[in-house]
Each structure stands twice: as C-alpha cells, then as structure tokens.
C-alpha cells in the first residue's frame, strides 16, 4: 500500500512534499471517508463533500483527489481502528488544524442532511483521539452545520 501511495504522488503531484506529507494527507482523507461510509450508505452528496474537503485542504486537482480518496477507502477497509490515522494527525497538525479536520468530517456527515447515531459516535471518538476539547468539538459541528446548504 505504501508503494502505491508513493507511486501515486510521484506520478501525479509535482514537487510533492516529503513522504510524511503524503501520509498525513492519506490519514486525513481516511477519516473523511469514514465519515462518509459510517452510516452504511455513502450518498453522492457525501462523496462530493469528501472530494471538496480533500481538494480544498490539500490543493489537489480533481483527479489527484479522486485517487487519494480511493487509496483512503482501501486503507479504511483494511484498518482495525482509527489510531493509525489520528496518531499521525496528532503528531503533525496544530490544534486548529485538528479542529478543522473534525469540522470537515462534520461537513461530510451533514451532506446528506441526516446525522445518525453512528456518525455521532464516530465524531465523538475522533474528537477524543485528536484531543479536541468539547467546546471546540461543538464549535466545529456548528460551523459545519451552518455551512451546509439546505
């Protein structure tokens, strides 16, 4: 899997950051993908929200973002927990960046206009693993809700 990721970035992204940068992009995309698939029904609106989040967060083209999302989906299928993703994010991201990841996850969850118990649980779990305080968790959720078109 790592060689697939390395090959993707070498082929598709000019002047790509070091391998650690690739890993953080994959870890972030994996959490966004999990927000999309946790309720067992990944809608087009949720997929579009993941694509928009990945493109915006990392400045990728549509094709690069699609490839990163496909890699993230494969990583999530093979993952046994979220720690491998959140530990990397904790090492590399500032508190504000971690809160932004949580907000982007909420945007994905809100994309289909329905927040179910699985999504709620995932968000709480990720917030705890990222050491996001309750006040920041709630603020991220409200920003995502307010940014979601009706």
Image: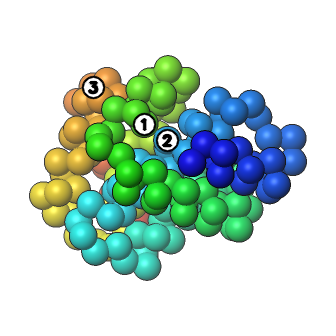
Q: Can you say whether 141 is above or below 150 in the image?
A: above
Are the residues tagged 2 and 1 within 8 Å (C-beta)?
yes
* 90, 72: nearer the viewer: 72
* 107, 26: nearer the viewer: 26
User: Could you tell me if residue 143 is visible in this image?
Assistant: no
Cα distance in 3D space between marks 1 and 3:
19 Å
Disc 3 versus disc 2: nearer the observer:
2
Q: Can you say whether 126 is above or below 59 in the image?
A: above
Tell me which numbered mark, 3 or 2, is placed earlier along the sequence: 2
What colouring method underlies this structural image? rainbow
Q: Which mark is residue 133?
A: 3
Q: Quadrant of residue 55?
A: bottom right
The residue singled out by tag 1 in the image is: 85
The residue singled out by tag 2 in the image is: 27
Residue 133 percent location from the top left of the image: 27, 25
In the image: residue 124, left or right of residue 150: left
Residue 47 percent location from the top left of the image: 46, 70
């Amino acid at each position: 899997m790592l060689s697939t990721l390395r090959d993707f970035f070498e082929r598709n992204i000019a002047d790509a950051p070091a391998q650690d940068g690739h890993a953080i992009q994959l870890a972030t995309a994996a959490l966004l993908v999990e927000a999309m698939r946790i309720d067992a029904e990944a809608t087009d609106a949720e997929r579009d929200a993941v694509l928009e989040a990945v493109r915006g967060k990392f400045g990728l083209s549509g094709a690069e973002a699609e490839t990163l999302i496909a890699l993230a989906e494969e990583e999530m299928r093979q993952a046994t927990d979220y720690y491998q993703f959140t530990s990397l994010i904790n090492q590399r991201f500032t508190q504000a960046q971690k809160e932004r990841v949580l907000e982007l996850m909420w945007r994905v969850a809100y994309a289909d206009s329905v927040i179910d118990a699985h999504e709620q649980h995932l968000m709480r779990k990720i917030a705890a693993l990222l050491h996001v305080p309750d006040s920041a968790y709630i603020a991220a959720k409200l920003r995502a809700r307010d940014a979601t078109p009706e």
